[in-house]
Image (cartoon, coloured by chain):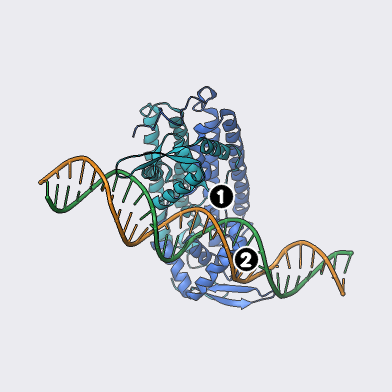
Chain colours: A cyan, B blue, C orange, D green
DNA sequence: ACGCAACATGTCTGTACTTACATGTCGTCG
DNA sequence: CGACGACATGTAAGTACAGACATGTTGCGT
């Protein structure tokens, strides 16, 4: 239930509407925890029912801004301090690597090149963003500094994956001469791919 | 729908039962894509109905082994070659970093130390496992080599995160003197957009 | 003969999440 | 004044996934 606490965490910075929160999820948090607006709106309704947030104001275009309550703030702090971190993660890129042996070696090379480019680009974009923070363009609040720390993790992970894709591309572990050697179905021969 | 293709990929190595597949998911793939047995059994039923796998044999204890069909093998290859990689990933560790500013600085230091230890330990375990593969203790099939590549990604990611936790612990971005300065509700308001 | 652990396969219920659809508001540009 | 785009909030339907519960089998130790 990270979405619940993510919303509380964002509301701890100040009041916001469902629309605002959806935007911030897609911008900043989306890369580590995707969330679509229907889920956000329904979670907000539940959080309000639980007394962890309350409606602060209603603006134009029937905008409803929520504010975190004392209970909500206590709850997000409790989560951060007491709840064990779930270290399992989902990453399709890595998952696919287990099945590289099923790929045509040329396709695999192309795949690894494009993955390398993707991660290098992402790392560069994040690094650029981090540098604007380091120049103080976003102020020096604790929130900004926490963001900077999260950003650093993003940079390092993307750099690590770019390096990995590069390494995998260069290594000859999956060289062409071996393709077709594998026997996927025991003694039954492999159908022509 | 990665689980579907993951099962096909595992079955491409040879026939296996739901029980086998559940075990392999929890051992090798579980760290990048967790899957519980009920989901695996129901997915297998669907895959069989779709003609992508078929029952190969029934053993003792009503064990049912499945075999991938030609259509199934074609489908997993099509997935690997044609379907765009989904680069979004979920990682609670990183998600929490956005909310570090809500934590007591001493708790945060302790948290970062334990995260650092966890990632360093995980990286070391994976590195040890990789070395047994490099010594050829698992043969040199293409499957083994693909596994080795996946393992390398795991090592690098965990090392990157260990390094990050170390860096975050040493940096003074979240030092104690600032705690309590933040104004979670009210006049401090939202960061300028 | 009995019990127990590991093997093996499922159902059921509830929650998390995605996608598509539906609706209404406000400002502005032509 | 009419169209349009950005703002803003939701419902509905379906899939993915997790956790609890249920059931039967086989081998082994005692």
Q: Which chain does the residue under circle 1 lie in?
A: A
Labelled pair 2, 1 in contact (Cβ < 8 Å): no
Chain assignment, label 2? B
Which residue does the image show at 55% across and 36% down from the upper left? A74
Q: Position of residue A15 (x, y in %)?
A: 41, 36
Regarding mark 1 in the picture, which secondary structure is present there? loop
Task: Residue B26: give x, y in percent of width and height.
Answer: 60, 57
The CA distance from mark 2 to mark 1 is 21 Å
Q: Marks 2 and 1: which is nearer the front? A: 1
Disc 1 residue crowd, few under 14, some 14–19, many 20+, Cα 10 Å: some
* Image height of A78 relative to B65, above or below: above
Question: Which residue is denoted by mark 1 in the rendering?
Answer: A88
Residue at position x 47%, y 33% from top?
A146
Say whether residue B119 is left or right of residue A163: right
Q: Please name whichever residue, B144 or A82, is drawn nearer the observer in this view of the structure.
A: A82
Name the one closer to the observer, B38 or A148: B38
- Look at mark 2 in the image and give the residue it sits on: B20
| Residue A6, image x, y percentages | 48, 42
Q: Is residue A69 left or right of residue B188?
A: right
| Residue A83 in view | yes
Q: How many marks?
A: 2
Q: Is residue A184 visible?
A: no
Q: Is residue A153 above or below residue A109?
A: above
Q: Secondary structure at mark 2?
A: helix
Same chain for the residues at labels 2 and 1, yes or no?
no
Side of A33 relative to B125 (left or right)? left
Q: Quadrant of residue A59?
A: top left
State the image coordinates of residue B168 (x, y, percent, origin top left).
52, 32
Quadrant of the image for the C terminus of chain B? top left
User: Residue at image x 37%, y 35%?
Assistant: A129
Which of the two residues, B174 or C10, is positioned nearer the viewer here? Answer: C10
């Amino acid at each position: 239930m990270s979405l619940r606490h993510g919303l509380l965490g964002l509301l701890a910075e100040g009041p916001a509407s469902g629309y605002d929160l959806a935007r911030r999820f897609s911008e900043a948090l989306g890369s580590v925890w995707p969330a679509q607006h229907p889920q956000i709106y329904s979670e907000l309704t539940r959080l309000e029912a639980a007394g962890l947030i309350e409606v602060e104001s209603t603006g134009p275009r029937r905008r409803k801004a929520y504010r975190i309550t004392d209970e909500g703030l206590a709850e997000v702090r409790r989560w951060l301090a007491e709840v064990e971190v779930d270290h399992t993660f989902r990453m399709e890129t890595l998952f696919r690597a287990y099945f590289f042996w099923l790929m045509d070696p040329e396709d695999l090379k192309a795949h690894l090149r494009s993955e390398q480019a993707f991660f290098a680009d992402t790392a560069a974009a994040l690094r650029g963003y981090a540098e604007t923070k380091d120049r103080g363009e976003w102020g020096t609040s604790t929130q900004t500094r926490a963001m900077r720390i999260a950003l650093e993790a993003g940079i390092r992970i993307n750099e690590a994956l770019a390096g990995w894709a590069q390494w995998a591309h260069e290594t000859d572990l999956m060289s062409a001469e071996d393709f077709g050697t594998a026997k996927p179905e025991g003694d039954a021969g492999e159908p022509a791919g």
